Image (cartoon, helix red, strand yellow):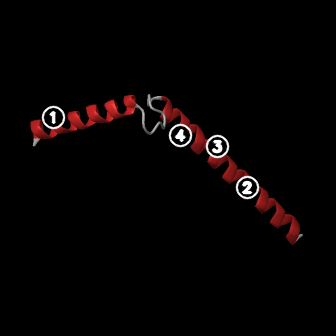
Amino acid sequence: MFAYIFQISLVIVVVALSVGYALWRIRKSVKANSDPCAGCTGCALRNQKKGKEACEKKKHEEKFG
């Protein structure tokens, strides 16, 4: 009887972890879909985007102190 309960518990844990991982990957891919770089680390578009964000942040700090 103990072995049966242990097996069922183990299956439930594995399924829960699998579902959690799948949801995390789906969320990550949806979030990356709105980012034109989508994880790229060194292209000119990403550098231009970072420069624009830094410029906007600086303008906001200067405007609102």
Q: Residue 42's image quarter?
A: top left
65 lies left or right of 25 = left
Name the residue tied to disc 4.
Answer: 28
**For residue 14, which numbered disc appears in the image?**
2
Q: Which comes sooner in the sequence, label 1 or label 2?
A: 2
In three-dimensional space, the C-alpha distance between marks 2 and 4, rounded to whole angstroms, equals 21 Å
In three-dimensional space, the C-alpha distance between marks 1 and 3, rounded to whole angstroms, equals 40 Å
**For residue 59, which numbered disc appears in the image?**
1
Asked if 59 appears above or below 3 in the picture, the reply is above
Residue type at tag 4: Lys
Name the residue tied to disc 3.
Answer: 22
Residue type at tag 1: Lys
Instruction: Give the secondary structure at mark 3.
Output: helix
Instruction: Give the secondary structure at mark 2.
Output: helix
Q: Which comes sooner in the sequence, label 4 or label 1?
A: 4
Q: Which comes sooner in the sequence, label 1 or label 3?
A: 3
Number of numbered discs on residues: 4
In three-dimensional space, the C-alpha distance between marks 3 and 4, rounded to whole angstroms, equals 10 Å
Residue at screen point 17% across, 38% down: 58
Residue type at tag 2: Val
Q: Please rate how many residues cluster around mark 4, counting C-alpha atoms within 10 Å: few if below 14, some from 14 to 19, many from 20.
A: few
Q: Which comes sooner in the sequence, label 3 or label 4?
A: 3
Quadrant into which the N terminus falls: bottom right
Residue type at tag 3: Ala
Q: Are marks 4 and 1 in contact (CB under 8 Å)?
A: no
Instruction: Give the secondary structure at mark 4.
Output: helix
In three-dimensional space, the C-alpha distance between marks 4 and 1, rounded to whole angstroms, equals 30 Å
Q: Please rate how many residues cluster around mark 3, counting C-alpha atoms within 10 Å: few if below 14, some from 14 to 19, many from 20.
A: few
- Relative image position of residue 56 (x, y in whole percent): 22, 33
Quadrant into which the C terminus falls: top left
Q: Are marks 3 and 4 in contact (CB under 8 Å)?
A: no
Q: Which comes sooner in the sequence, label 3 or label 2?
A: 2
